[in-house]
């Protein structure tokens, strides 16, 4: 029935508007809740919180690769001493187990390249390995010796062998250094095996499989979901891999939105260091520790901690 002349036309029902508004509100709550659920809990991992520089807030991590050994002697106490002397509070090192189950700081499975003697490291005792000469800079150190010598030094530790999983976890538990180490491995299976044995939450970076998965799914906003499932708080990646560019601004932003730090290895040129930090990298791993220290100092991000 038409309304009589002069009668104001009633407003149309607002049900559809209310429904749309309600749906939008629920969608926003769901999205925010999901985002909080899938983000790694970065607050539980002091290792990644670098606030020891001159500026307020967390600073990019500078990691000296196997210490600083421009004339040889990687992963030795002398190499670590040089890096610490430059102001490094973070080192990237590798560990393997000796025949008697001691965690040794060494990269290769075989001794020949660095120690000049044949045979696998796993075939010798810790005492024998400590007596070898690594480029004239001393023998192979134990991980315990490094942790005790520099009680505030933070170590990015690549667990290189399966026989090192249990003794490494037992050492971390015994010394209570969970906040000082980041567990890394190219093998996610090995990395997760370590994490399952640790008595407290410990920071970890992804292996090859998880790195690839995050690279594929980060553009879809799923970096945080993958990270939480895989128990990682950081990715450590090369800038390019087999001709594919891994580190881009979009990738870094997607990882940051998912609560993940991205550390790039191995960066030895000053121009590349500056470019990657300007792009948003959360950390750099370098053989050229002196160059990286100068780069960080120019950004008022040095020294990083007082590890001595």
Image (cartoon, rainbow, N blue to C red):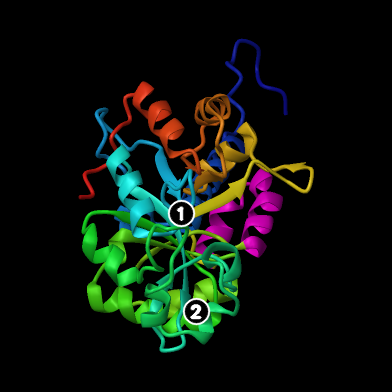
The quarter of the displayed image where residue 275 is located: top right
Give how far across and how far down residue 102 sits, in percent.
38, 81
Residue located 39% across and 67% down the image: 139
The quarter of the displayed image where residue 40 is located: bottom left
- Distance (Cα) linking label 2 and label 1: 24 Å
Q: Is residue 272 left or right of residue 304?
A: right
Residue located 55% across and 76% down the image: 161
Give how far across and how far down residue 180 sits, in percent.
30, 59
Q: Is residue 203 left or right of residue 15?
A: left
**Label 2 SS:** helix
Count how many numbered circles sit on residues in the image: 2
Q: Is residue 89 at least partly visible in the picture?
A: no
* Quadrant (top left, top right, bottom left, bottom right) of the N terminus: top right
Q: Nearer the viewer, residue 153 or 119?
A: 119
Query: Mark 2, mark 1: which one is toward the viewer?
Result: 1
In the rendered image, residue 212 lying in the magenta stretch gets the answer: yes
Magenta range is 208-229
Q: Is residue 286 at least partly visible in the picture?
A: yes
Instruction: Please rate how many residues cluster around mark 2, counting C-alpha atoms within 10 Å: few if below 14, some from 14 to 19, many from 20.
Output: some
Tell me, for residue 193, which label it has, or none: 2
Residue located 20% across and 50% down the image: 308
In the rendered image, residue 19 lying in the magenta stretch gets the answer: no
Q: Is residue 163 left or right of residue 246?
A: left
Residue position marked by numbered label 1 in the rendering: 66
Give how far across and how far down residue 225 sits, in percent.
56, 58
Contact (Cβ within 8 Å) of mark 2 with mark 1: no
Majority secondary structure in the magenta region: helix
Q: Nearer the viewer, residue 196 or 108?
A: 108
Residue extending farthest bottom: 100
Give how far across and how far down residue 84 sits, in percent.
30, 46
Q: Nearer the viewer, residue 102 or 192?
A: 102
Tell me, for residue 88, which label it has, or none: none
């Amino acid at each position: 029935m038409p309304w009589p002349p002069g009668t104001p036309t009633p407003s149309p029902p607002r049900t559809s508007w209310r429904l749309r508004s309600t749906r939008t509100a629920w969608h926003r709550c769901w999205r925010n809740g999901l985002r909080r659920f899938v983000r790694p809990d970065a607050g539980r991992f002091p290792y990644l919180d670098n606030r020891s520089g001159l500026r307020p807030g967390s600073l990019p991590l500078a990691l000296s690769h196997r210490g600083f050994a421009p004339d040889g002697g990687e992963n030795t106490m002398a190499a670590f001493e040089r890096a610490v002397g430059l102001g490094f509070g973070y080192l990237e090192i590798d560990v393997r187990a000796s025949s008697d189950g001691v965690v040794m700081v060494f990269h290769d499975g075989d001794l020949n390249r660095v120690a000049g003697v044949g045979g696998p490291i796993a075939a010798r005792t810790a005492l024998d390995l400590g007596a070898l000469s690594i480029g004239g800079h001393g023998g192979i150190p134990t991980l315990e010796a490094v942790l005790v010598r520099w009680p505030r030094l933070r170590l990015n530790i690549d667990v290189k062998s399966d026989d090192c999983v249990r003794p490494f976890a037992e050492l971390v538990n015994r010394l209570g250094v969970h906040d000082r180490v980041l567990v890394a491995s190219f093998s996610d299976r090995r990395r997760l095996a370590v994490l399952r044995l640790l008595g407290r939450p410990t920071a970890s970076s992804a292996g090859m499989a998880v790195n690839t998965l995050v690279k594929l799914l980060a553009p879809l906003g799923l970096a945080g979901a993958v990270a939480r499932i895989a128990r990682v708080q950081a990715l450590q990646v090369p800038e390019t891999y087999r001709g594919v560019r891994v580190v881009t601004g979009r990738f870094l932003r997607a990882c940051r939105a998912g609560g993940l730090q991205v550390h790039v290895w191995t960066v030895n040129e000053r121009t590349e260091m500056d470019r990657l930090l300007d792009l948003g990298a959360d950390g750099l791993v370098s053989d050229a520790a002196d160059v990286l220290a100068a780069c960080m100092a120019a950004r008022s991000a040095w020294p990083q901690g007082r590890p001595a």
